[in-house]
Image (cartoon, helix red, strand yellow):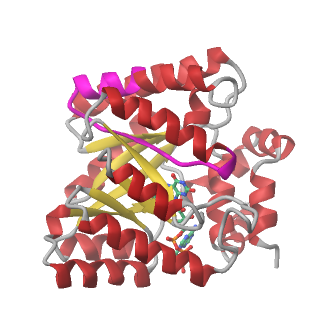
Amino acid sequence: MISRSTLIWLSRHEGLKDFATKFRLFKRLTTRFVAGETIDEAVSFIREINSEGSTASFDHLNESVSSEAEASKEVSEYKNILTRIDQTGIRSNVSIKLTQFGLGLDPEIAYKNAREVVLEAKKRNNFVRVDMEDSKVTQVTLEVFKRLRAEFEMDDVGLVLQSYLRRTYTDAQDLLKLPARIRICKGAYNEPPDVAFPDKKDVDENYVKVMQLLLSSGIYHGIATHDPKMINAAIDFASREGIGKDKFEFQMLYGIRRDLQRQLTRDGYNMRVYVPYGKHWYPYFMRRIAERPANIWFVLKNLLKG
Ligand SMILES: Cc1cc2nc3c(=O)[nH]c(=O)nc-3n(C[C@H](O)[C@H](O)[C@H](O)COP(=O)(O)OP(=O)(O)OC[C@H]3O[C@@H](n4cnc5c(N)ncnc54)[C@H](O)[C@@H]3O)c2cc1C
C-alpha cells in the first residue's frame, strides 16, 4: 500500500496537480472532501449543517500562490465570502492560509493581504483563523499572526498549532500570554524527525498535553480532530475541571465522521465544520487521502464506476 509520506509528497507535485484539475473525472471524486467549486455550493452545505446545530469555517482552496496578482484575488474572494456570510445569515467564520496570500513571495505581502481580510471580518463582526502550513513557514506564520494580533482583538483573529511539532507546547504557552484563540490539530504535512514526532503515540500525547493547557486557559479554543481518543480526553478533562461545554468547540473537516459531528452536537457540544470549496482542490484532497490511505480504495472504486 502507498505510504502517507508518498501521498503527501504527491500532494506537492505541480505536474499532477495540473493534470488532475483538468479532468472532470477527477473533479467528481473530490466531492468526498470538498463542498463544491463555488461559494454558493459551500453556502448551501453550511445552511444544512447550521440547521443541525453546527457552525462552519469557510475555506477557499488555494495555497502557495505564485504571483502578487493571484494573492490579491484571494483577498477579493475572502471579502466576497464575508459578504455572503452576512447576506445569507449563515453561521460561519473563515480560515485562511498565508501562502495563499503570498507568504512564499514575501511575508510582507502576506501580512498586508491577511490584514485586509481580518479588517473586513472585524467590520462584519466575524473571525479569521490562520491555518498552519508546513514547518518551513511555522516561525514566519507565528510572526505574521503576532503582528495581526497586536492590531486586532482576540475575537478577530486566531491561529492553528500542530501537536506533531516538538515546539508546539512552548508556542502554545507563548501565544496564551497574548492572549490568543488557538485551534489545536495533529498536523497534516511531511516533517523531518528533528522538528516533528515521528511516532503517532507521541503526537497524540502532545495533543492531549496542549489541549489541556488550552482548555485550562479560560479562552475559547478549537479542538480539531476526528480521533475519538482525543475527543474523549477533551470531554473527560473538561468535565473533571468543571469547564463548561460552551467554553470551547470541537472542529472537524467536511466529509469526515459526520456521524460523530452530529453526535457531539446532540450531546450539547459546540461543533464547527471546516468547509473547503474551490477549483484548486488537489493538495488539500491529497492530504485527506494521506491521512487515511484506505481512502484510496474509495477513489479507485469511484474512478472505475466511470
Ligand atoms: C477543523 C480542522 C482544521 C485543520 N487545520 C489544519 C491546519 O491548519 N494545519 C494542519 O497541518 N492540519 C490541519 N488539520 C488536519 C489535521 O492536522 C489532521 O491531519 C487531521 O485532522 C487528521 O487527524 P485526526 O486528529 O483526525 O487524527 P487521526 O489519528 O489522523 O485520525 C483519527 C480517525 O479519524 C478519521 N479520519 C482522520 N482523517 C481522515 C480522513 N482524511 N478520511 C477519513 N477518515 C479520517 C479516521 O477514522 C481515523 O482513524 C485540520 C483538521 C481539522 C479537523
Q: Residue at x 36, y 75 (%)?
A: 259
Query: Which quadrant of the rendered structure holds the C terminus?
Result: bottom right
Q: Quadrant of residue 270?
A: bottom left
Could you tell whether 20 is left or right of 266 in the image?
A: right
Residue placed farthest to the top in the image? 69
17 or 174, nearer to the observer:
174
| Horizontal and vertical percent position of residue 78 | 43, 28
Q: Residue at x 19, y 74 (%)?
A: 266
| Horizontal and vertical percent position of residue 164 | 59, 67
Find the magenta span and give its range: 116-136
| Horizontal and vertical percent position of residue 235 | 27, 80
| Horizontal and vertical percent position of residue 15 | 86, 41
Q: Is residue 66 magenta?
A: no
Residue placed farthest to the right in the image? 15
Q: Please indicate, yes or no, whether residue 292 appears anywhere in the rendered image.
A: yes
Q: Quadrant of residue 293?
A: bottom right
59 or 250, nearer to the observer:
250
Q: Residue at x 61, y 62 (%)?
A: 288
Q: In the displayed structure, would residue 260 be above or below residue 58?
A: below
- Number of numbered labels in the structure image: 0
Q: Please indicate, yes or no, whether residue 254 appears anywhere in the rendered image.
A: no
Could you tell whether 151 is left or right of 109 in the image?
A: left
Q: Residue at x 23, y 56 (%)?
A: 219
Q: In the displayed structure, would residue 276 be above or below residue 304?
A: above
Q: Quadrant of residue 258?
A: bottom left
Could you tell whether 88 is left or right of 118 in the image?
A: left
Query: Which quadrant of the rendered structure holds the N terminus?
Result: bottom right
166 or 72, nearer to the observer:
166
Q: Is residue 131 magenta?
A: yes
Q: In the displayed structure, would residue 9 be above or below residue 258?
A: above
